[in-house]
Amino acid sequence: MKNYIEIKTNRLVLRPVRLENADAIFKYRSDSITNKFQGWIPKTINDVYEFIKHRVASEIDVVGTWFQFTINLLENNKLIGDVGIHFFDFDKQQVEIGFTLDKNQHGKGYATECVTAMINFLIEKLNKRRIIASIDPGNVNSIKLVERLGFRKEAHFKESIFANGQWHDDLVYAILKNEWMKNH
Ligand SMILES: CC(C)(COP(=O)(O)OP(=O)(O)OC[C@H]1O[C@@H](n2cnc3c(N)ncnc32)[C@H](O)[C@@H]1OP(=O)(O)O)[C@@H](O)C(=O)NCCC(=O)NCCS
């Protein structure tokens, strides 16, 4: 599939991340309090350039890579967050999803709207059959988000992730294509 992808919802448009988005991304991603459950918190704008250049794939659906979309308001194109897809499965049937919104945009249903559209895209266009999310047990808003969308908690790993100088537990949530199709 070619990389120019645009996914529209009622209020949002998702597009592949580009270097010119670095400024806007730095503004909300560098907020170390809101993003305390995330492994990557940029300290400088250069960290964001490096991330986009070296840690995000230039092509979607490549095994072993992350592909990153920006989340933009449809009405004025303002960049308000990002959603990443990790193509971790050698058989190309399963992906991991991660999401971040600018804290000024929390509580408006944007993440629910964005992740719903992304899952439809992953199932309908990329033929994925299982989608997972890896979440810190303290990340209440993320847990509410995936449970609202119908994900099931499949695992609670104890101290399985080392990030920001300490060990963290990890919850794995998942949804299968047939479960998603029953409700969407
Ligand atoms: C995870 C994250 C994206 C969730 O954001 P969120 O704002 O809670 O989720 P949504 O945008 O879907 O908004 C849902 C809330 O908006 C409310 N809402 C308001 N208008 C709404 C609408 N039109 N549609 C749906 N919900 C609406 C819902 O009732 C819900 O409120 P509640 O949490 O009080 O129940 C956000 O907390 C975040 O960016 N956190 C920091 C980064 C992070 O930790 N990422 C996850 C790593 S695993």
Image (spheres, rainbow, N blue to C red):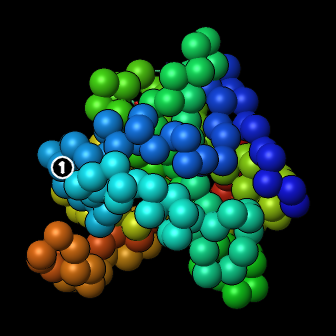
The residue that disc 1 covers is: 32
> Hey, which residue is sitting farthest front in the picture?
46
Q: Where is residue 35 in the image (x, y as percent from the top left)?
A: 25, 49
As drawn, 87 above or below 51:
below
**Residue at point 73% right, 56% down?**
122
Residue reaching furthest top? Answer: 75
- Work out which quarter of the rendered image holds the N terminus and state it: bottom right
Q: Going 82% across and 64% down the picture, which residue do you hit?
A: 127
Residue 26, quarter of picture: top left
- Name the side, left or right, on which 129 lies relative to 65: right
Residue 160 rendering spot, x and y as whole percentages: 26, 84
Q: Quadrant of the C terminus?
A: top right
Helix, strand or loop at mark 1? loop
What's the amino acid at mark 1? Ser
Whether residue 174 appears in this view of the structure is no
Name of the residue lying farthest toward the right: 1
- Tell me: residue 150, above or below residue 79: below
- Vertical relation: 18 (above or below) 1: above
Compared with 84, 30 (above or below) is above
